[in-house]
Image: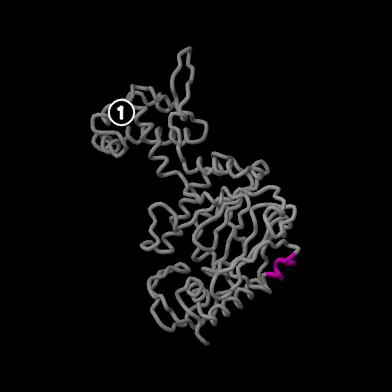
Amino acid sequence: MEARTRTYLEGRFGDYYRRSDVSLPPAADRREWGHIPWSAGRTTMIRHQSLLDIGELGDFLHRTAPRHVYFSSARFSDPGASSMDEKGWQSADLVFDLDADHLPGVDPEETSYAEMLEACKGELLNLLSFVDDDFDFADTTVVFSGGRGYHVHVRDADVRGLDSEARREIVDYVRAIDLDVDGLIGTESVRGTNRRVLRRRGGWGARVHRRLVDLAERLREMDEADALDRLQELDGIGEGRAKTILGQVQHNFEAIQRGNVEAGGPGTRILVDALAAEAIEEETAPIDEPVTTDTKRLIRLPGSLHGGSGLRVRSLERDEIEGFNPLSDAIPDRFRGREINVEVTDPGPTTFDGDTFTIPEGEQSLEECLGIFLMARGRAEKRPE
């Protein structure tokens, strides 16, 4: 990035902060603060600061106009101390991080930025089903990171004291690492007779049971050929076994609804194993383990700007998420409404502000928000007006 470009972006970031009201996180005075300036060459994090060190947040952001702004997930007795041991760790938010270019099946070389962000939103919805349904966390905040993904902050009092190992168990659960399918099946006594049933009141057992009942209902509505084809899409189920399972579904549907894995013989249990594998593939959330297990992590400040995109790090209400388009809805209003001159160095297809178009190489006059986006992403340099 050329010096003129850095200077321009720093100035415009400062102007954004002069007119923006960036909110503090809870217990802000007990958190460590860090930022990355618009310096040339190697990126350097300035950290080990407290609110006492930086002063009033809005004034600090306007004066320094940082490229990136962070605060710690942890709360400390002395957050400005120069070493982690001296800070006096007290507790930490539980933070989940989803990064678009680390998603399974996504190749950053082949997938556009817009497509990666859309895929990441789907994974966010998967993650929130665990946050809400499996863990029943109450104090949660969803944040678009401004760059490639989303953060979810959990601040329930009973999770803030968890150590790294306990947090790793949460990661393993969400990612279904070493999931014990046998453990999803319990014993239920009915009129003095024991039977093996899926645990249906929550967790992975409930997830597999929902799939089992949904599949059974759909199989009963299909013609035989289509039903057999659907069953054979599942691991470990060939033509002969598919016919056996279909017969069990047709004649023992009520038992299957109750989660009885012994209804009609071994076929139902084989079906449960196959659906568990399908659930693991489709319902896990590929969260970044180091972020969640780290009890002292620095995380982006909501309301700040992301120096790699020029977009806002934005907190989202739950009813906003499904319709949220970060390449439109996270554009700062401050950067709209005027044209600037840039030299496009990386031309090509671009999706931005609700449209997809091709950016040609060379000097271009573009709306400022698009120009800032391209400069921050290393695709353009600032030219004189």
Q: Residue at the spot x=46%, y=67% of the render?
A: 354
Q: Nearer the viewer, residue 43 or 271?
A: 43
Type of residue at label 1?
Answer: Ile
Q: Mark 1 — residue? A: 245
**Scheme by which the image is coloured:** one colour
- Give the structural element (helix, strand or loop) at label 1: helix
Kindly report the secondary structure that dominates the magenta region of the rendered protein: helix
Residue 18 visible, this angle: no
Would residue 294 be found to the left or right of residue 357 on screen?
A: right
Q: Position of residue 325 (x, y in %)?
A: 49, 61
- Magenta residues? 53-60
Q: Is residue 126 left or right of residue 7?
A: left
Does residue 348 appear to the left or right of 74 in the view shown? left
Rendered location of residue 362, percent (x, y): 41, 83
In the rendered view, tell whether residue 60 sits above or below residue 289.
below
Visible residue check, residue 46 = yes
Are there few (<14), some (14-19), or many (20+) residues within 10 Å of tag 1? Answer: many
Residue 59 higher or lower than 120, as above or below = below
Residue situated furthest top in the rendering: 192
Q: Position of residue 153 (x, y in %)?
A: 60, 51
For the point 63% across and 42% down, the residue is 162
